[in-house]
Image (cartoon, rainbow, N blue to C red):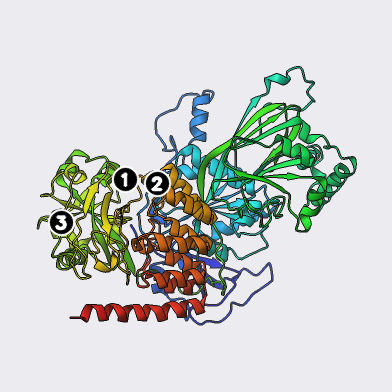
Amino acid sequence: QTFMRHHWVHRRRQEGKCKQCNKSFQQRFSFQNKDIIAISCSWCKAAYHNKTTCFMMQQIEEQCTLGIHASIIVPPSWIIKLPRKGSFKTSLRTSKKRKVSVKKRKSKEDFRPFLLKPIPSPLIKPVLVFINPKSGGNQGSKLYHKFCWMLNPRQVFDLSQGGPRLGLELYKKVPNLRILAAGGDGTVGWILSTIDALGLSPPPPVGILPIGTGNDLARTLNWGGGYTDEPISKILCNIEDGQVVQLDRWNIEVTTNESTEGEITEDMTTDTLPLEVFNNYFSLGADAHVALEFHESREANPEKFNSRFRNKMFYAGAGGRDLLKRSWKGFAEHIRLECDGVDLTQKIQDMKLHCLLILNIPRYASGTLPWGNPNAVGFEPQTHDDGYLEVIGFTYSSLATLYVGGHGERLMQCREVRLTTFKSMPMQVDGEPCRLRPSHINITFRNQAYMVTKPKRRGSIPIANDPPSSVPERLRLQVSRIGVTDYEMFHFEKDKLRQASVPLGIIVVDNNSDLEQVREEINKMLANFQTNSSDTVISFVKLSSNWCFLDSTTTERFFRIDKSQEALHYITDISSEDLYILDPEAPPSSPYLQASFQLCIPNTNGHKEMNGSIIGREDGALTLSFPFPVSPPKSPRLLSVSEPVSPNVLSQDKSYNFTSSTNVTTDRKPPSLSHLDKQFMDASKRGDIHKIAELYHKGANLLATDQYGMTALHHAARFGHKGVVKFLIDNAPPILLDMAEHEKGQTALHKAAWYQRRTICHMLVAAGASLTRTDFQGNSPRQQALKAEDKELAAYLENQEHFQLVQSEDQETAV
């Protein structure tokens, strides 16, 4: 049941204005006055005066739209309430109650009050809220009630009641899920570790509402250093519209140093660290000693540490005492440090360091920037998704200047750290301190988590009684074909069916289209392709007249849709990501994996005709390879089955292999990068032009893509590395300019426009990048610039877009 009526409640106090007469509600402050002044819907928050002129009886039966946050609220129709076991009454006489066994007690603890049956839709992006009531004083418990009022209470969870595991297990199959963690950095790490333990695929991205103390991760992702009564509605809009980025996570393994068994260990020492995975930083020495002293004092006297100001004063006092005593003067003599196989022990001893910090994110100690902005050769700007750790040392003077804009002693950027300690010393992992016995510590890369950054937008805050915001009217869908042999063989294995599917092209339809209209669009796509590719022999794109749609939204298997019932089904009912069709006359997928064809290109530029081939791989992706003769590009387009080849695409006398971007399915495993291509991708993120040139001469593939379909040009445009962009334009085939990544379907020009990289936009446009190509949301690069509120860049792109369209029309009409 998708139709839902309003849930009207009587209100004795109501803010805002009446939706009917647009007049304010009269506020009565008398506690004894029990008059009902308003009638409000608890879902969409629409409110009316308690008068017949404002609230009419027919409104009781109206459909509720769930208000401005309809796209992130879990609809009540998704929730199935479960009866508690043994709750049904019986007329049989019960025997005397026995003692409850441990097994029954456990079953009560594991009881789930409800189940979820989600209805996939590209328009719904549910937000799961986890709140730590212990963070930020009493802020957590207040926020819990506010979120329950704004959202469905079934999507808001209190972490003090069993942690995040129950909520994540209930919502693990909900598509397009996002998570909002209200707490400190420790709360975020707790949720990320639980996601890893449950093996959620794909892992939902996590946003942060900072109500902790340090909040360094929240500062890094633009969420700020603390919560200051920002409207809940604005926070929910930010988590819905925020961009998804990646965060490196690191394993930290500890083994006892057996060579120091005779060493006298201090009391209160441990053999293990508080955490085995860290997201922010790991440190040892002077700063960890202050953190440990604060932790122990707070455990002994919690009443003395009930405000942030007192906590800061304690840190300042403890740090000042350490500075005067120079307690860690011989710190460097008791450790051995090795980064990526390079021994830095002598270097830290020569610097006479008192503290060592291994940093993953730019922020540390409540917002300071210990890495700074390096200008020296060999050090790159720090990012949280580059796969590198920053190793920093501190003397007491550099620690003192850290809070006034200073930075530490930069030692190295590396992928692996080996650390050996020869005496017990304090350490901290993401703010959790301890005193560790002499140990061997090994830090290695674990994985990358998905995080949501707060969008940098300006504008007014949405009002609860405003009409719901407009939703996208067009859907962009990948059409893939499945043969009847594969369908019968992998009937109950959805993943194998997806892998066996063959992509035919991309269609754009209205979100309220029925399947008859979608069938017409598919036929138009195939007819258009055959018309534009008359010289091409591609037998596998032809469909028989008996093909039918497949429903891919169910959890168990794909279901056929009868052709006579297509008018009864909408496209959103059967497709959440890709659109699958069943062709009874199609051969099994294995011949496609070995199929090849000759691609003949019209001889319009005086070049010889070139032969090309498509070769299938085991993962189901189609790999195209053909040589490029020298020819200046006009408006290159990404070669795909649904987009025929233009002779203007061809450039340079080199042969490249690349994967067709039409094969975009979230369940497919992306092609693994070679070590050389991985280095090339990392160098493009860091803007190391010398490394780029070196790897190119060694044979790096300029068209290589990472697991998200992003090329080196995407990363260089995103981070603003102009030299790398120029190198790729000069040396790569022009097909690179319009290659789209898998997550949003955006080209490098989309990325450059969104990040307001004006110079890079000029370079890409001058090289021939398409200005009319749209992403999965239907946005062109010009619209991306408008979203980023860069009107000058948008005006330039609009001007170039008109020029490009006129130029293409001149080419088409030329005789």
- Residue 556, quarter of the rendered image: top left
Query: Between 661 and 487, which is closer to the camera in this rendering?
Result: 661
- Residue 37, quarter of the rendered image: bottom right
Residue at x-position 63% and y-position 65%: 230
- What's the amino acid at mark 3? Ile
Q: CA distance from mark 2 to mark 3?
A: 38 Å
Task: Name the element at disc 2.
Answer: loop
Disc 1: which residue: 555
Disc 2: which residue: 173
Residue at x-position 35% and y-position 72%: 772
Split into 4 quadrants, where in the image is the C terminus? bottom left
Asked if the residues shown at circle 3 and circle 1 are in contact, with their CB atoms under 8 angstroms apart, the answer is no
Q: Position of residue 534 (x, y in %)?
A: 13, 65
Q: Is residue 375 visible?
A: yes
632 in relation to 418, above or below: below
Q: CA distance from mark 2 to mark 1?
A: 9 Å
42 in relation to 386, above or below: below
Q: Earlier in the sequence, mark 2 or mark 3?
A: 2
Q: Position of residue 412 (x, y in %)?
A: 64, 44
Disc 3: which residue: 538
Q: CA distance from mark 3 to mark 1?
A: 34 Å
- What's the amino acid at mark 1? Thr
Left or right, 534 with reference to 348: left
Asked if the residues shown at circle 2 and circle 1 are in contact, with their CB atoms under 8 angstroms apart, the answer is yes
Left or right, 455 with reference to 728: right
Residue at x-position 60% and y-position 60%: 222
